[in-house]
Image: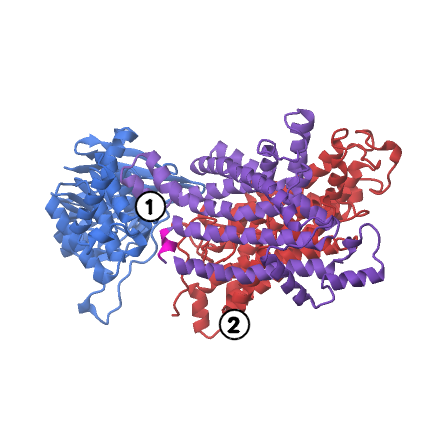
Chain colours: A purple, B blue, C red
Amino acid sequence: MGRYVVRRLLQMIPVFVGATLLIFLMVNVMGDPIAGLCGERQCDPSTAAQLEKEFGLDKPVWQQYLTYMGNVFTGDFGTAFNGQEVTELMATAFPVTIRLTIVAILFEIVIGITLGVITGLRRGRPVDTSVLMFTLVVISVPTFVTGLLLQLLLGVEWGWIKPSVSAEATFGELIVPGLVLASVSLAYVTRLTRTSIAENKRSDYVRTAVAKGLPRRRVITRHLLRNSLIPVVTFIGTDIGALMGGAIVTERIFNIHGVGYQLYQGILRQNTQTVVGFVTVLVLVFLVANLIVDLLYAVLDPRIRYA
Amino acid sequence: MLLEVRDLHVEFRTRDGVARAVNGVNYGVDAGETLAVLGESGSGKSVTAQAIMGILDIPPGRITGGEILFQGRDLLKLKEEERRKVRGAEMAMIFQDALSSLNPVLSVGDQLGEMFVVHRGMSKKDARARAVELMDRVRIPGAGARVRDYPHQFSGGMRQRIMIAMALALEPALIIADEPTTALDVTVQAQVMDLLAELQREYHMGLILITHDLGVVADVADRIVVMYAGRIVESAPVHDIYKAPAHPYTRGLLDSIPRLDQKGQELYAIKGLPPNLMHIPPGCAFNPRCPMARDVCRTDEPPLYEVSDDRGSACHFWTECLHG
Amino acid sequence: MPEPLPQEPYTSGGGRAPEDGAIAATGMGGAMDLATSEGETLEKRPGGPDGTGPWDRPRSLWSDAWRDLRRNPVFIISGLVILFLVVISIWPSLIASGSPLRCDLAKAQEGSQPGAPFGYDGQGCNVYTRTVYGARTSVTVGVCATLGVSLLGSVLGGLAGFFGGLSDSFLSRITDVFFAIPVVLGGLVLLSVVTSNTVWPVIGFMVLLGWPQISRIARGSVITAKQNDYVQAARALGASNSRILLRHIMPNAIAPVIVVATIALGTYIALEATLSYLGVGLKPPTVSWGIDISAASSYIRNAPHMLLWPAGALALTVLAFIMLGDAVRDALDPKLR
């Protein structure tokens, strides 16, 4: 197990370097990193040259990348457009997005798994067909449309929620945005659980469990669910990173000042430091979530643990 | 009779039509007796066993007729909860592929102990102790240490022993073994089969041994039932059948066993394929493949003719077959 | 016979071995994940003409699938919707007169009326005409991106799976890198610097970030197909690599790619709209549902019709492609029979 963790950690390194380098290149080579520094107007050439020197932009890109990463690992993510430290922005933005992600994950677990189990056990019945159709619709309607529609209905027409979230972004305010963020994954969790349950239901070991004379309830909870939920749990785990990265659309609709909002501002104002910093952290979150999922997999499935 | 199956009919309704898997099967087994059920895949031998155990997939499966008398009670008339209490406790089943039939994420100790927890209401600790005893009983070396291991950590033969231990746990009156050795290496097959036969004698259980391997049958079975297309085509004491089969299909099966004294000769094979269960041929189901088939075989379905007191054959020309 | 590669012990649909993908196939975020993981169920199907029930005579996977599809109402309906979309993408004037760019500010935000059944938008453009013309953009983006992604992905993934070794590990790590970048974020970063107002940068971006998804599927199914006995037999008989790939592996490995690509097509259309909504996808004067929805979202209180029509068209289009992919997957997956 220990060696397994170490090997996983080692495998993470090239992916981390690759992904951050890719983003770094996109921002620095394709964009104009100093364009945002002079505010609204064009930088004059001498200021530009001075700024380039100051930020080390006259050096080769790989050197810039190394310097940047060196700084990142000492906790220095640079400064944002308004002179604020990027780390300060992160300190206010991440808690909001993390709360939003938690709400979304809870929806996936509670609604997604429940619906999946029900439909998987009643495959082919009306309830199955209708839930399945509903998941297809949810998957087909892009998140921003779902978000706008819910905002229109619940926020504007019926007045159940405030159409935009306050700066505090409490859990209560984040329920609907969290549902929107979760929607596609939720439908997917339902389908994955359903497939997994339906498939395992016909497996030999479930037949054995029935032949042993176990009550139906025990067959389902102890034998069927235990096996069927392994892929679901791993999916939800890997989804954490994807949700945080995908929160940008939801946050824009409900005006939530989280990671997506800051990133969006950073991109609009061409602020390299903010963009690269936030994306680096998101990539890291994604990788760590994946690592945890792999370990979780080993805990849940002895065939991996002892392989 | 410990178990008696009477005129059992099972069909499967699929999108492509109705497959008639079992069409009027009759057989019985006594305590301490071993009944071998022989047939190709699709002959209905496993479906009959699943119907007896009450583990048929319903739907698409459906029992359309017949009785299953177990210790005098018709199992088909029991409520599901009563039926469940019979399963595992009074009759148990051993499956072919132990690797897929054991739950991969539970330790073998948990899976064995579960029998005692559910049916006998034992504590987990006592159940664990009984699990170790059982593993000892089926001669798994180091049972005390291995009780915490998972199925994939055992060899094929050891896994099948665990399946046997699980079936024996509550000392049922009847065991159904569905191809218990087919998935094993030849060298291990004999060991597992011997163990099963030995335990059966010891506990004086009835054993239904489902197989397509005539070699296994000769050593352990008392009686043989040969099935084809969901019907019994021959039923006889084991020695009679080996001496002189009374059905051309049985003869074909026997002839297709490779024998040392026929080295160099071409191996016999029954021509053709087993019938499609959605379109079973009229008359005798075996007629398209039968070397002796005549016109009557294509029109009249043969009943199970009485060959002697304890022997039957569903062939219009069983006398010819028996003596020729 | 060479040692067969170790088979995954999992039977469950979305199960994946940590061994296989250091990084899960879910980094793309949002709907794009669906296709990947759904494809994985196919990936583990041992390819070959053995998808027959115990009582059936052998039939080929494809003719079987086609027979199934023709009877499947989901396939027929989604197929008809897609056919309709393709037709109006090519000849939008068939059902909409006038230009989507001719707008009259005087009519801004007006509701349904003769000649404009969906009303007018904030700029006084005819919402019906714009919705009809928007189909062309979405279908173009979806089809081109899918073709690009499928070609690049299956060639790279297929070759890596077939030859294995160093090139395979290298490709796997590259795919991991791409999966680690959230797709909407990548789009924001990359497309925010593009000034062109054609559809090509958006398509190019989708190909760039989308190919690893297909390459992973293609790699997996090629590896599965490669282990089939008849492929081993062909190899033993001295067939050349190119012959084995084209004659024996391709026909069997292509099914999962087709399924995932069909579903992905729908998600690309959704992604284009999402990027356009965020203001980095397509830019006016290109007519796009995403742009219209984005513009309409600021009038959502007064004139929701401006939002509902393009949003409905978008959802219906994505739904049609995902349903088609779903039906094709069911038909090609013998396990579900």
Left or right of C155, for residue B236: left
How far from the left and from the top, in percent, is residue A261? Answer: 68, 43
Q: In the image, is residue A266 part of the stretch drawn in magenta?
A: no
Q: Nearer the viewer, residue C268 or A3?
A: A3
Q: Amino acid at mark 1?
A: Tyr
Mark 2 residue crowding within 10 angstroms, few (<14) / some (14–19) / many (20+): few
Residue at position x 39%, y 50% from top? A299
Tag shown at residue C241: 2
Q: In the image, is residue A303 part of the stretch drawn in magenta?
A: yes
> With respect to residue C5, does B244 lie above or below?
above
Q: Nearer the viewer, residue A112 or B297?
A: A112
Using the rendered image of the protein, determine whether residue C30 is visible from the camera's viewpoint.
no
Residue position for label 1 = A205
How far from the left and from the top, in percent, is residue B138? Answer: 18, 51
Residue at position x 63%, y 35% from top? A168
Using the rendered image of the protein, determine whether residue A66 is visible from the camera's viewpoint.
yes
What are the residue bounds of the magenta stretch? A302-306
Q: Residue furthest bottom?
A: C238
Residue at position x 61%, y 61% from top? A70
Q: Chain of mark 2?
A: C
SS for dot 1 = helix
